[in-house]
Amino acid sequence: MTTMKEIAEKTGVSVSTVSLVLNDRDEGRVKSGIADQVRAMAEKLGYKPNPLARSLRTSKTRILGFISEEVATTPYAGGIILGAQAAASQLGYMLITVNTDGEDSEDEEITALKRYGADGFLYAKMSNRYTDVPESLASTPLVLVDATDRQGRFPSVEPDEIRIAHDATTRLIEAGCQRIAYIGCSEPMLAQDRRFEGYRTALEDAGRTYDESLVCNVLNNGPALQAVSELFDSQRPDGFFCFNDARAWYVYECAARRGLFIGKDISVIGVDNHRVLAETLEPQLTTVELPHFEMGYWSVCKLVSMIEKRDLDDIDMPETTAPLPPLDSPIPAMIRCTLIEKNSVAQRA
Amino acid sequence: MTTMKEIAEKTGVSVSTVSLVLNDRDEGRVKSGIADQVRAMAEKLGYKPNPLARSLRTSKTRILGFISEEVATTPYAGGIILGAQAAASQLGYMLITVNTDGEDSEDEEITALKRYGADGFLYAKMSNRYTDVPESLASTPLVLVDATDRQGRFPSVEPDEIRIAHDATTRLIEAGCQRIAYIGCSEPMLAQDRRFEGYRTALEDAGRTYDESLVCNVLNNGPALQAVSELFDSQRPDGFFCFNDARAWYVYECAARRGLFIGKDISVIGVDNHRVLAETLEPQLTTVELPHFEMGYWSVCKLVSMIEKRDLDDIDMPETTAPLPPLDSPIPAMIRCTLIEKNSVAQRA
DNA sequence: TTGAAAGCGCTAACAA
DNA sequence: TTGTTAGCGCTTTCAA
């Protein structure tokens, strides 16, 4: 590893000059001839600054801590982390991802990260909920990801759940569904409340009346299938908006057992948390993809702008995001919908 | 943040003494009275060493790089990372997880990590394959995770695929299944070859003849369901060993469409890559969980033992896991798989 | 316009 | 048994 010292020696200048030049602080302070020489030598020797030494001096590490309970364990987390990493690397930061098992380890991991000098933190949850931020985090720059600070002290980046649900339900309406059910989540969380709201207002916006007997909130196990089954038979819906793919699966199962086909007899849109389902059932199940990548990406941009106290308007998203597919599907019952939208990420505060 | 200097001043000794004591190198070099005083003061002041400064001096960072293509994007990766993180944190290391999008970014990320001073690397793949290790990694301590070095230069930690398949198939035999099918993966990879081998030898070990018409290797999409369907009808198997849960899904689908029930009419064991399925279909599907946590954990132990050039026999797995072979296991490249069986297979008399 | 010098917090060889 | 000293590689006054 080449050091500034070597460059200084080989160029016949002092280390301070090298430092000045290589940090682009030479404007009007170092003769441009010298500056050029230094730069050339640095290039030739393949100089790369030693971040450790720099950090020791500046107490800025360009390290970001990404803290999540289960996030990194769940499939959909991947997108968030990927996005966060992309942004970090583009902005010259390094992302350290840490999983905490909920309780104990959390504070430990946070202190560890702090000692390594993390400049700021991302605090991510699995699904949008009101969240209490651990005290140990309160003193450093912090952005919540797919979570909302209960005390409203910290900025957060979250998907626009209402809109997601509104869009999905509207799709079902436009596909000609008459009786649209909502298979939700019976655990309390923002995502559930908001998706339900989106479902409801979409119906109302289309001039329909919301019918609570078409709603069924279940957990991810046990009696869920039974509950969906009952709804299926008693209400005979022809369209389903599902909180996630696990729930869409129950509908799928009901249909299979009754000899019905999704995309033909009934329409289903599910928010796709676990990519498997989309991959496995692709032709039949319509999925809504949450803008995970974008969430991660945007959170990091936000965080860095806080750390460096500057606007990051110049930073734009990479082109990885897909546009909304047109709604011209020939078979109305089969709506293929991959909803990835940059602007469906709502930014708060 | 308290520094050694402060401790030195408040205790009236020199920094070197403090350093000696706090690094437990004071045996016979510092009077025990002084040592005690120093330790007490450190404790009182809540001293934590500054890893940056230490690293700058020692050029050891206690940072480990975890590199994976898609791993962190896929659900089952979570376990590996969790395990790796657990081990790292227990051994006093920090894990930096990096996703590369395959080609370009890989070398970049690696160099970045190297500049941050990573002491060693974990290189993980999604499913056991022969892997070419990037040149940039060849010079540092390295352990492959769920992958095998094509040139055999680096140690790797992988599940015992043959045994997994053998166990699963045997289980089906014991459950009384007469015609056991294997739904495999048609992409070439070690895991597929080995699982197939395990399936086959299990049959033979039970005195049965392997029948190739009961084997169906498919991809994860398109014609897969069709192929499984045909096998289902033409061969009428009563037991299925599936390469992964996506494939178990096809069997599930076939059963549902024919009014059959898993766990009653047919038995299915699938290797559970995507935890969702286990959660959703828990009562019906028998799953084999790969020892992901253990793989991660053990890889880190192995890596650290290489870095520190010492045995880690004293390090044992946390309680959540099954016993592991000693580090100098006769087949060093292979880790014995821990089979976690969640549910029972349909029992036939 | 440049360089000398101090120091970030720590370790380690060497003196005392 | 303890302290002095010299850095690790970099940034940043302050003088020249």
Image: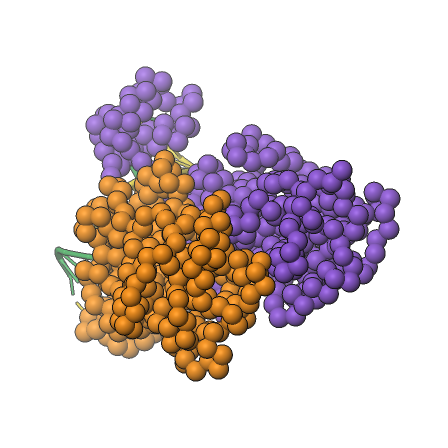
Chain colours: A orange, B purple, C yellow, D green
Q: Is residue A22 above or below residue B311?
A: below
Q: Position of residue A227 (x, y in %)?
A: 45, 50
Q: Position of residue C5 (x, y in %)?
A: 22, 51
A90 or B224, nearer to the observer? B224
Visible residue check, residue A103 = yes
Q: Position of residue B98 (x, y in %)?
A: 46, 57
Q: Residue at x 49, y 79 (%)?
A: A331
Q: Residue at x 81, y 61 (%)?
A: B213
Query: Which quarter of the image is occupied by the C terminus of chain B?
Result: top right
Q: Is residue A114 above or below residue A309?
A: above
Q: Is residue A148 above or below residue B39?
A: below
Visible residue check, residue A24 = no
Q: Quadrant of residue A102?
A: top left
* Left or right of residue B282, residue A80 in this image: left
* Left or right of residue B77, residue B59 in this image: left
Q: Is residue B208 above or below residue B46?
A: below
Q: Residue at x 24, y 41 (%)?
A: A135
Number of numbered discs overlaid on the protein picture: 0
A171 or C1, nearer to the observer? A171
A131 or A188, nearer to the observer? A188
* Left or right of residue B50, residue A320 in this image: right
